[in-house]
Image (tube, rainbow, N blue to C red):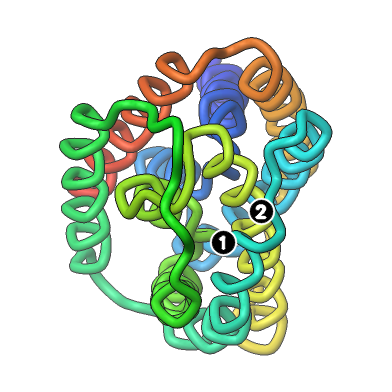
Amino acid sequence: METILFLAIIALVAFLYASVGHGGASGYLALMAIWGTPIGEVRSTALVLNIIVSSIAFIHYYRAGFFRWNLFWPFVVLSVPMAFVGAMIPLEGSVYKVVLGVILALAVFRLFFISEKKETKELKILPAILFGGAIGMLSGMIGIGGGIILSPLIILLGWSNIKESSAISAPFILVNSISGLVALLYFSLKWNTDMSLWVLFGILGGYAGAYFGSNYFNVPVVRNILATVLSIAAVKLMLV
């Protein structure tokens, strides 16, 4: 029964995150911590699920026409190499979870006051590159793709609307997760024996979430889902 519940929650996490263009690593990390997954397997497992679900989300949002290359590339210039470096600097204890939880909580607070803007501001390249590098480093250190930080950031700065942020976050998560996983190959890669089953349920939930998020959920719905996802992640990270 516990296994069925665990798989169902993985599918739900994948659905919620994929609907807003995310891979779900922060949700998987919190879930595995609660379930007592060996710490050595947590980061690699979360990254694998992240890669699969974010890939599905990207395909759907790209097909729906929300992806903007000129908004994407500045953030990945430094994020990919920094995610690799960060993955080789594992953090011990719960301090990083509390810090990330606080960041996400602040993002949630601001998202509740965001209204969809008809026009967005011009992207500032240098700040975007620096933000990307910082997010990449943090992402690598704790085993996420960084979309859960990038998405509210670019919305709050006015560089993107809700749907575009989802379309940008998905490939951002994808490339950073791959970078972090490659680093773990040289550092401390460990697999969970039930990985294939987890991946299957992640695919099912991720496909459904990305499909509805990119095609049917309107902006208020996506914004509310994003705020809900961030809230859950913040609480879990601070309490686990």
Residue under pointer 2: 192
In percent of width and height, residue 198 lies at 69, 37
Q: Looking at the picture, does residue 41 appear above or below residue 202?
A: below
Q: Looking at the picture, does residue 129 appear above or below residue 53?
A: below
Task: Tell me: 95 left or right of 175.
Answer: left
The foreground one among 141 and 57 is 57
Q: Quadrant of residue 83?
A: bottom right
Q: Quadrant of the N terminus?
A: top right
Mark 1 vs 2, N-terminal side: 1
Task: Tell me: 128 left or right of 184.
Answer: left
Task: Tell me: 18 left or right of 31.
Answer: right
- Residue at 64% x, 22% y is 209
Q: Is residue 79 in sight in this rendering?
A: yes
Tag 1–tag 2 contact (CB < 8 Å): yes
User: Please, what secondary structure does the residue beneath circle 2 have?
Assistant: loop
The foreground one among 126 and 22 is 126
In percent of width and height, residue 37 lies at 48, 50
Q: Is residue 7 in sight in this rendering?
A: no
Q: Quadrant of residue 3?
A: top right
Q: Which amino acid lies under the numbered mark 2 shown in the image of this protein?
A: Asn
Dot 2 alpha-carbon crowd within 10 angstroms: few under 14, some 14 to 19, many 20 or more = some
In percent of width and height, residue 124 lies at 44, 71
Which label belongs to residue 41? 1
